[in-house]
Image: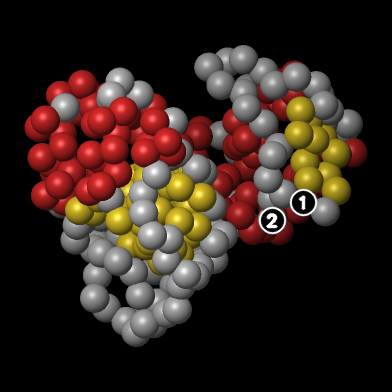
Amino acid sequence: MSGSITHSDSTRGGMRRSPAQPVRADPELLARVGLFADLSSAELIGLAALMRPRAYARDEVIYLRGDAGTAFYVLATGRVKIALTSPEGKELILRRLGPGDFHGELALLDDEPRSADAVATEASVLLVLQRDAFRQFLADHPTVGTKLLATVSSYLRRNAELIQDATFLDVPARLARTLLELAGGTDGALPAAGAVIPDRMKQSELASLVGATRESINKWLGSFERQGLIRYDKGQITLVKPSGLQQRIY
Protein backbone atom coordinates (compact mmCIF):
# COMPACT_ATOMS: atom_id res chain seq x y z
CA MET A 1 0.00 0.00 0.00
CA SER A 2 1.21 3.47 -0.77
CA GLY A 3 2.81 5.40 2.06
CA SER A 4 1.23 8.59 0.70
CA ILE A 5 -2.21 7.73 2.08
CA THR A 6 -3.19 9.36 5.34
CA HIS A 7 -4.68 7.16 8.05
CA SER A 8 -6.07 8.26 11.37
CA ASP A 9 -3.83 6.21 13.73
CA SER A 10 -0.59 7.57 12.29
CA THR A 11 0.86 10.83 11.08
CA ARG A 12 2.88 9.21 8.28
CA GLY A 13 2.32 10.22 4.67
CA GLY A 14 0.51 13.09 2.99
CA MET A 15 -3.08 14.25 3.04
CA ARG A 16 -5.77 12.53 1.01
CA ARG A 17 -9.15 14.14 0.48
CA SER A 18 -12.07 12.20 1.99
CA PRO A 19 -15.81 12.57 1.32
CA ALA A 20 -17.69 15.30 3.18
CA GLN A 21 -17.64 14.77 6.94
CA PRO A 22 -21.00 13.98 8.60
CA VAL A 23 -21.88 16.17 11.57
CA ARG A 24 -22.74 13.71 14.36
CA ALA A 25 -22.90 10.11 15.50
CA ASP A 26 -26.29 8.41 15.43
CA PRO A 27 -27.60 6.78 18.66
CA GLU A 28 -30.09 4.76 16.59
CA LEU A 29 -27.21 3.12 14.72
CA LEU A 30 -25.41 2.35 17.97
CA ALA A 31 -28.58 0.65 19.26
CA ARG A 32 -28.25 -1.86 16.41
CA VAL A 33 -24.68 -2.76 17.36
CA GLY A 34 -24.77 -6.00 19.38
CA LEU A 35 -22.07 -4.72 21.69
CA PHE A 36 -24.37 -1.92 22.89
CA ALA A 37 -27.70 -3.78 22.87
CA ASP A 38 -28.20 -3.52 26.65
CA LEU A 39 -27.64 0.24 26.88
CA SER A 40 -30.50 2.61 27.69
CA SER A 41 -31.50 5.40 25.33
CA ALA A 42 -29.77 7.92 27.59
CA GLU A 43 -26.56 5.85 27.60
CA LEU A 44 -26.65 5.51 23.80
CA ILE A 45 -27.05 9.27 23.45
CA GLY A 46 -24.14 9.80 25.83
CA LEU A 47 -21.98 7.34 23.89
CA ALA A 48 -22.87 8.97 20.57
CA ALA A 49 -21.80 12.32 21.99
CA LEU A 50 -18.32 10.89 22.61
CA MET A 51 -17.93 9.60 19.05
CA ARG A 52 -16.87 11.59 16.02
CA PRO A 53 -17.99 10.55 12.53
CA ARG A 54 -15.27 10.38 9.92
CA ALA A 55 -15.73 9.73 6.22
CA TYR A 56 -13.29 7.59 4.23
CA ALA A 57 -12.95 7.29 0.47
CA ARG A 58 -12.81 3.94 -1.29
CA ASP A 59 -9.39 2.29 -0.73
CA GLU A 60 -8.45 4.80 1.95
CA VAL A 61 -6.37 3.39 4.79
CA ILE A 62 -7.85 3.68 8.29
CA TYR A 63 -4.79 2.25 9.99
CA LEU A 64 -1.92 -0.10 9.16
CA ARG A 65 -0.41 -3.02 11.03
CA GLY A 66 2.20 -1.68 13.43
CA ASP A 67 0.49 1.67 13.99
CA ALA A 68 -0.21 2.76 17.56
CA GLY A 69 -3.83 2.14 18.50
CA THR A 70 -5.58 5.39 19.41
CA ALA A 71 -9.26 4.76 18.59
CA PHE A 72 -12.17 2.31 18.38
CA TYR A 73 -14.40 2.33 15.28
CA VAL A 74 -18.04 1.52 14.53
CA LEU A 75 -18.97 1.28 10.87
CA ALA A 76 -21.99 3.47 10.08
CA THR A 77 -22.07 3.07 6.30
CA GLY A 78 -19.93 1.37 3.67
CA ARG A 79 -17.53 -1.56 4.03
CA VAL A 80 -14.11 -2.15 5.56
CA LYS A 81 -11.66 -5.02 5.27
CA ILE A 82 -9.28 -6.15 8.01
CA ALA A 83 -6.27 -7.72 6.33
CA LEU A 84 -2.66 -8.78 6.59
CA THR A 85 -0.24 -7.78 3.84
CA SER A 86 3.13 -9.42 3.19
CA PRO A 87 6.26 -7.39 2.29
CA GLU A 88 5.71 -8.59 -1.29
CA GLY A 89 2.19 -7.12 -1.31
CA LYS A 90 0.24 -10.39 -1.01
CA GLU A 91 -2.93 -9.87 1.00
CA LEU A 92 -4.98 -12.11 3.28
CA ILE A 93 -8.38 -10.73 4.29
CA LEU A 94 -9.24 -11.70 7.87
CA ARG A 95 -12.64 -10.02 8.10
CA ARG A 96 -15.03 -8.05 5.93
CA LEU A 97 -17.12 -5.55 7.88
CA GLY A 98 -20.40 -3.80 7.09
CA PRO A 99 -22.69 -1.30 8.85
CA GLY A 100 -23.03 -2.00 12.57
CA ASP A 101 -19.71 -3.87 12.79
CA PHE A 102 -16.80 -2.55 14.84
CA HIS A 103 -13.02 -2.89 14.92
CA GLY A 104 -9.88 -1.46 16.44
CA GLU A 105 -10.50 -2.70 19.97
CA LEU A 106 -7.53 -5.07 20.32
CA ALA A 107 -4.79 -2.44 20.36
CA LEU A 108 -6.77 -0.41 22.90
CA LEU A 109 -7.13 -3.39 25.22
CA ASP A 110 -3.50 -4.52 25.26
CA ASP A 111 -1.59 -1.31 24.37
CA GLU A 112 0.16 -3.17 21.55
CA PRO A 113 0.44 -1.85 17.97
CA ARG A 114 -2.27 -2.56 15.43
CA SER A 115 -2.18 -6.24 14.48
CA ALA A 116 -3.64 -5.84 10.96
CA ASP A 117 -4.52 -3.27 8.30
CA ALA A 118 -7.97 -1.67 8.09
CA VAL A 119 -8.99 -0.25 4.70
CA ALA A 120 -12.30 1.10 3.41
CA THR A 121 -13.35 -0.98 0.39
CA GLU A 122 -16.01 1.57 -0.58
CA ALA A 123 -16.92 5.08 0.52
CA SER A 124 -17.63 4.69 4.24
CA VAL A 125 -18.48 6.60 7.40
CA LEU A 126 -17.00 5.39 10.69
CA LEU A 127 -17.85 6.53 14.20
CA VAL A 128 -14.59 7.05 16.07
CA LEU A 129 -14.18 6.73 19.84
CA GLN A 130 -10.79 7.79 21.18
CA ARG A 131 -8.76 5.54 23.50
CA ASP A 132 -9.41 7.32 26.83
CA ALA A 133 -13.14 7.62 26.20
CA PHE A 134 -13.27 3.97 25.11
CA ARG A 135 -11.60 2.75 28.29
CA GLN A 136 -13.75 4.93 30.54
CA PHE A 137 -16.85 3.67 28.75
CA LEU A 138 -15.82 0.05 29.40
CA ALA A 139 -15.14 0.84 33.06
CA ASP A 140 -18.61 2.36 33.39
CA HIS A 141 -20.37 -0.48 31.51
CA PRO A 142 -18.96 -3.88 32.57
CA THR A 143 -21.52 -5.83 30.51
CA VAL A 144 -20.11 -4.23 27.36
CA GLY A 145 -16.64 -5.37 28.38
CA THR A 146 -17.90 -8.95 28.79
CA LYS A 147 -19.45 -8.89 25.32
CA LEU A 148 -16.25 -7.45 23.90
CA LEU A 149 -14.24 -10.34 25.34
CA ALA A 150 -16.63 -12.79 23.68
CA THR A 151 -16.11 -11.00 20.36
CA VAL A 152 -12.34 -11.09 20.73
CA SER A 153 -12.56 -14.82 21.48
CA SER A 154 -14.51 -15.37 18.27
CA TYR A 155 -11.82 -13.50 16.31
CA LEU A 156 -9.15 -15.75 17.81
CA ARG A 157 -11.13 -18.86 16.88
CA ARG A 158 -11.60 -17.55 13.34
CA ASN A 159 -7.89 -16.84 12.98
CA ALA A 160 -7.10 -20.35 14.23
CA GLU A 161 -9.47 -21.74 11.57
CA LEU A 162 -7.67 -19.72 8.89
CA ILE A 163 -4.33 -21.17 9.98
CA GLN A 164 -5.78 -24.69 10.07
CA ASP A 165 -7.33 -24.31 6.61
CA ALA A 166 -4.11 -22.95 5.13
CA THR A 167 -2.21 -25.89 6.62
CA PHE A 168 -4.52 -28.79 5.84
CA LEU A 169 -6.88 -27.78 3.01
CA ASP A 170 -6.08 -27.32 -0.65
CA VAL A 171 -7.24 -24.26 -2.62
CA PRO A 172 -10.56 -25.71 -3.88
CA ALA A 173 -11.48 -26.81 -0.36
CA ARG A 174 -10.69 -23.37 1.04
CA LEU A 175 -12.66 -21.74 -1.78
CA ALA A 176 -15.66 -23.99 -1.14
CA ARG A 177 -15.62 -23.12 2.57
CA THR A 178 -15.33 -19.40 1.83
CA LEU A 179 -18.24 -19.45 -0.63
CA LEU A 180 -20.46 -21.21 1.90
CA GLU A 181 -19.54 -18.68 4.60
CA LEU A 182 -20.12 -15.69 2.30
CA ALA A 183 -23.57 -17.04 1.45
CA GLY A 184 -24.48 -17.20 5.12
CA GLY A 185 -23.52 -20.71 6.14
CA THR A 186 -22.53 -20.82 9.83
CA ASP A 187 -22.05 -23.43 12.55
CA GLY A 188 -22.40 -26.29 10.08
CA ALA A 189 -25.72 -25.05 8.65
CA LEU A 190 -25.72 -24.97 4.86
CA PRO A 191 -27.18 -22.07 2.87
CA ALA A 192 -30.24 -22.96 0.81
CA ALA A 193 -29.78 -24.06 -2.79
CA GLY A 194 -29.90 -20.94 -4.95
CA ALA A 195 -28.44 -18.71 -2.21
CA VAL A 196 -26.70 -15.69 -3.69
CA ILE A 197 -23.58 -14.16 -2.15
CA PRO A 198 -24.76 -10.59 -1.41
CA ASP A 199 -21.72 -8.74 -2.76
CA ARG A 200 -20.35 -9.00 -6.25
CA MET A 201 -16.91 -10.44 -5.64
CA LYS A 202 -13.85 -9.57 -7.67
CA GLN A 203 -11.63 -12.58 -8.16
CA SER A 204 -8.74 -10.67 -6.58
CA GLU A 205 -10.80 -10.07 -3.41
CA LEU A 206 -11.92 -13.69 -3.30
CA ALA A 207 -8.28 -14.72 -3.69
CA SER A 208 -7.35 -12.56 -0.67
CA LEU A 209 -10.09 -14.20 1.39
CA VAL A 210 -9.02 -17.70 0.41
CA GLY A 211 -5.27 -17.12 0.54
CA ALA A 212 -4.59 -18.04 -3.08
CA THR A 213 -3.72 -16.41 -6.40
CA ARG A 214 -6.35 -14.84 -8.64
CA GLU A 215 -5.42 -17.30 -11.39
CA SER A 216 -6.07 -20.25 -9.08
CA ILE A 217 -9.43 -18.81 -7.99
CA ASN A 218 -10.41 -18.27 -11.64
CA LYS A 219 -9.54 -21.91 -12.39
CA TRP A 220 -11.56 -23.36 -9.54
CA LEU A 221 -14.58 -21.10 -9.97
CA GLY A 222 -14.73 -22.40 -13.53
CA SER A 223 -14.39 -25.97 -12.30
CA PHE A 224 -17.17 -25.53 -9.71
CA GLU A 225 -19.41 -24.03 -12.39
CA ARG A 226 -18.81 -26.92 -14.79
CA GLN A 227 -19.66 -29.34 -11.97
CA GLY A 228 -22.99 -27.56 -11.43
CA LEU A 229 -22.07 -26.38 -7.93
CA ILE A 230 -22.27 -22.63 -8.60
CA ARG A 231 -23.24 -20.03 -11.18
CA TYR A 232 -20.77 -17.22 -11.71
CA ASP A 233 -21.84 -14.18 -13.70
CA LYS A 234 -19.88 -10.92 -13.66
CA GLY A 235 -18.88 -11.32 -10.04
CA GLN A 236 -22.29 -12.51 -8.83
CA ILE A 237 -22.01 -16.00 -7.33
CA THR A 238 -25.04 -18.25 -6.81
CA LEU A 239 -24.70 -21.50 -4.89
CA VAL A 240 -26.57 -24.06 -6.98
CA LYS A 241 -25.58 -27.09 -4.88
CA PRO A 242 -24.25 -26.10 -1.44
CA SER A 243 -24.05 -29.74 -0.33
CA GLY A 244 -21.63 -30.40 -3.19
CA LEU A 245 -19.41 -27.55 -2.03
CA GLN A 246 -19.46 -28.92 1.50
CA GLN A 247 -18.39 -32.35 0.23
CA ARG A 248 -15.43 -30.68 -1.50
CA ILE A 249 -14.10 -29.45 1.84
CA TYR A 250 -13.57 -32.90 3.32
Relative depth, front residue between 10 and 57:
57
Residue 34 picture location, percent across and down: 39, 27
Q: Can you tell which quarter of the image residue 55 is in?
A: bottom left
Please identify the quadrant where the C terminus is shown: top right
Residue at the disc numbered 2: 202
Is 6 displayed left or right of 89 in the figure?
A: left
Residue at the disc numbered 1: 235
Q: Residues at badges 2 and 1 in contact (C-beta under 8 Å)? A: yes
Residue 60 picture location, percent across and down: 46, 68
- Helix, strand, or loop for circle 2? loop
Q: Can you tell which quarter of the image residue 224 is in?
A: top right
Neighbour tally class for label 1: few under 14, some 14-19, many 20 plus, Cα within 10 Å: some
Which residue is at a point 46% across and 47% down the rendered structure image?
76
Q: Where is 201 relative to 249, above or below?
A: below
Determine the CA span between mark 2 and mark 1. 6 Å
Is 95 displayed left or right of 245 in the figure?
A: left
Relative depth, front residue between 168 and 46:
46
